[in-house]
């Protein structure tokens, strides 16, 4: 047996060993605290050994027939592992590592030659084309989450060209699913870039930490302070904008609950490698040197930032699966911590979120598509019926998580949430039936829940802008990108605005938020539910944006329509930050006047 055969045999054995370990962790749920973490250590270690071996023996492996795409497949698996770890832990360093490995595959053209025009590559290698397609789809998802807009555009163009080439050269193969993926990314980019501005969705210390209010936040003291470390994010709408298993609304919430790297982006910081079973960080990839280096003694992180909250992003779950995930997170929730749950779904079977829209001229348009409701399961627990035989409201209305014709199996009722109120809960319901969840307030089983309930109808100056499937949820948009949501509301395109005007609008909003922070931190009527979470920067920012959203919609919609077009928070926030307060109304008026859209609003005494 030649030396090359020995090297090739060792390499194949290492590939098989790494693949077996990869299979064990690939389908581990992306929620809950993984107790068998040593499996992840083993698979990273296996791929580290494999990667180093192919680097050291590259020439002999090529002589023995190693293809470049095989190297790309190894690097792609490593990137996939890192991205999986990011989704389980929300640690940004894993996301960065995934990006670096995927970028290296692209820049080194490891899959080049997988195009059928190559003499060395025939139709028999269709499997490699599918590997390349999966690589592009995964790299697109990582780039989207990292907000690498230019890379997303480049990848989307190449991905589309690759799918077109596959259709032309493999006519006997159906590439319909891949064409749908191309359509998804094009649609996602169109919506996501339509309201692009200089502000990141992530929490930026530059934009979101207000110097004048920081001392008040720092001095604020509540009898109890809750830590925000866990969140569950999901949406379920027909035809919603999405890419892969990330919908536009969960994408926005995912970003909203993370830190934006400050200063010099991610910094490398050496750490000692350990072989005693404790966590080994398998990072390391130097874009400068052009070498993908799986270095155990490197740690890519921004040391100035605390860790991100862990987020379980669940794509189109069944009701039973959703409840199971909530139960898992709730069971593992640390003491003195709070769980944020974001649920976006229609309250009607098989319907989109939008049924009516508000027109600045005062007219209303109803949806022509009336879908009949399925037969409902009218049975409910006796505990939810009062002594007079009347329903308590816990099982009367619902959110719809499922396909058409699935009956009550797809109904998530307010009563389904009650068991989880034994622990602190911050619940955001974005639905045309969100107000049904007011029934939770006062029905908690141990902890008073913090509730944000969306308007029942979105409101827009231009009715054509109101499609949920076109731009995502308006309420979620206000919570994640308030100024962009304001512009969308009044039919104002940020891309058509001078950068200076838009930046000044951001400054107006930032000053208002700073002032409202001081009011909340000095209020004597702030409910304990809000007081115990206001110290957390992510939750405090959501509260401020809710105040802004409620005020803007209050002034935009006629008073007689307020019940449908205004969001609700329970327990109530102080009157000092209500739409009727001078400090809130004046801020919205300043912003509207600055953007020359004040005629669209109904301000009092202005």
Image: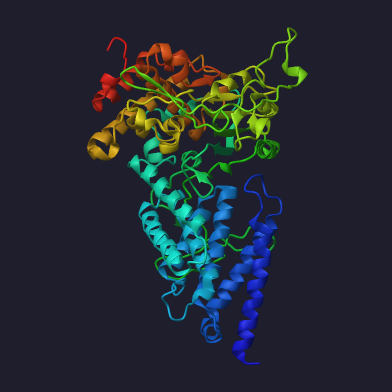
281 w.r.t. 421: above or below: below
Q: Of residues 389 and 45, which is closer to you in this image?
A: 389
126 w.r.t. 395: above or below: below
Q: Of residues 513 and 361, which is closer to you in this image?
A: 361
Report x, y in % for residue 222: 56, 23
User: In the rendered image, is residue 386 in sight?
Assistant: yes
- Tell whether 267 sits left or right of 605: right
Q: Of residues 417 and 213, which is closer to you in this image?
A: 417
Farthest residue, direction right: 382
Q: Where, quadrant-wise, is the C terminus in this rendering?
A: top left
Q: Of residues 109 and 11, which is closer to you in this image?
A: 109
Residue at 69% x, 23% y is 446
Quadrant hosting residue 413: top right
192 w.r.t. 447: above or below: below
User: In the rendered image, is residue 334 in sight?
Assistant: no
Counting every numbered tag in the picture gives 0
Farthest residue, direction bottom: 1
- Tell whether 493 sits left or right of 58: left
Quadrant hosting residue 153: bottom left
Residue at 66% x, 44% y is 32
């Amino acid at each position: 047996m030649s030396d090359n055969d020995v090297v090739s045999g060792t390499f194949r054995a290492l590939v098989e060993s790494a693949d077996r370990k990869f299979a064990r962790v690939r389908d581990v749920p992306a929620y809950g605290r993984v107790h068998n973490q040593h499996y992840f250590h083993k698979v990273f270690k296996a791929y580290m050994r494999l990667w180093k071996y192919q680097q050291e023996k590259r020439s002999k492996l090529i002589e023995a027939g190693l293809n470049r795409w095989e190297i790309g497949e190894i690097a792609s698996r490593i990137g996939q592992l890192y991205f999986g770890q990011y989704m389980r832990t929300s640690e940004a360093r894993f996301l960065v590592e995934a990006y670096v490995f995927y970028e290296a595959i692209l820049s080194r053209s490891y899959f080049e030659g997988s195009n059928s025009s190559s003499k060395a590559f025939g139709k028999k290698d269709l499997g490699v084309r599918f590997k390349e397609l999966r690589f592009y789809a995964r790299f697109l998802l990582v780039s989207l989450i990292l907000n690498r807009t230019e890379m997303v555009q480049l990848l989307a163009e190449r991905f589309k060209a690759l799918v077109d080439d596959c259709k032309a050269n493999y006519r006997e193969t159906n590439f319909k699913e891949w064409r749908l993926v191309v359509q998804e990314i094009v649609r996602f980019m169109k919506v996501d870039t339509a309201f692009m501005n200089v502000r990141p969705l992530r929490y930026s210390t530059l934009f979101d930490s207000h110097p004048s209010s920081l001392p008040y936040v720092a001095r604020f003291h509540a009898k109890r302070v809750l830590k925000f470390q866990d969140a569950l994010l999901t949406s379920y709408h027909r035809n919603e904008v999405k890419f892969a298993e990330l919908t536009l609304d969960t994408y926005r919430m995912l970003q909203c609950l993370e830190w934006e790297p400050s200063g010099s982006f991610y910094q490398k910081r050496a750490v000692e490698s350990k072989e005693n079973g404790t966590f080994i960080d398998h990072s390391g990839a130097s874009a400068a040197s052009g070498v993908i280096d799986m270095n155990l003694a490197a740690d890519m992180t921004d040391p100035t930032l605390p860790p991100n909250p862990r987020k379980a992003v669940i794509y189109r779950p069944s009701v039973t699966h959703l409840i199971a995930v909530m139960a898992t997170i709730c069971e593992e929730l640390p003491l003195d911590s709070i769980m944020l749950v974001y649920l976006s779904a229609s309250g009607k079977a098989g319907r989109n979120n939008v049924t009516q829209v508000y027109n600045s001229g005062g007219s209303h348009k109803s949806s022509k598509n009336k879908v009949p409701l399925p037969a409902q399961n009218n049975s409910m627990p006796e505990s939810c019926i009062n002594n007079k035989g009347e329903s308590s409201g816990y099982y009367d209305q619902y959110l719809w998580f499922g396909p058409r014709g699935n009956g009550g199996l797809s109904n998530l009722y307010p009563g389904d949430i009650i068991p989880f109120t034994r622990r602190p809960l911050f619940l955001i319901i974005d639905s045309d039936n969100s107000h049904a969840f007011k029934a939770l307030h006062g029905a908690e089983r141990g902890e008073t829940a913090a509730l944000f309930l969306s308007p029942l109808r979105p409101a827009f100056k231009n009715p054509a802008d109101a499609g949920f499937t076109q731009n995502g949820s308006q309420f979620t948009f206000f919570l994640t990108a308030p100024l962009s949501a304001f512009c969308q509301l009044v039919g104002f395109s940020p891309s058509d605005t001078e950068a200076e005007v838009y930046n000044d609008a951001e400054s107006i909003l930032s000053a208002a938020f700073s002032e409202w922070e001081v009011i909340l931190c000095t209020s004597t009527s702030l409910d304990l539910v809000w007081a115990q979470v206001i110290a957390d920067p992510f939750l405090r920012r959501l509260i401020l944006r809710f105040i802004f959203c409620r005020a803007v919609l209050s002034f935009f919609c006629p008073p007689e329509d307020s019940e449908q077009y205004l969001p609700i928070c329970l327990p109530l926030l102080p009157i000092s930050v209500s739409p009727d307060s001078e400090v809130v109304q004046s801020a919205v008026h300043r912003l509207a006047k600055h953007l020359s859209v004040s005629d669209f609003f109904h301000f009092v005494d202005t």
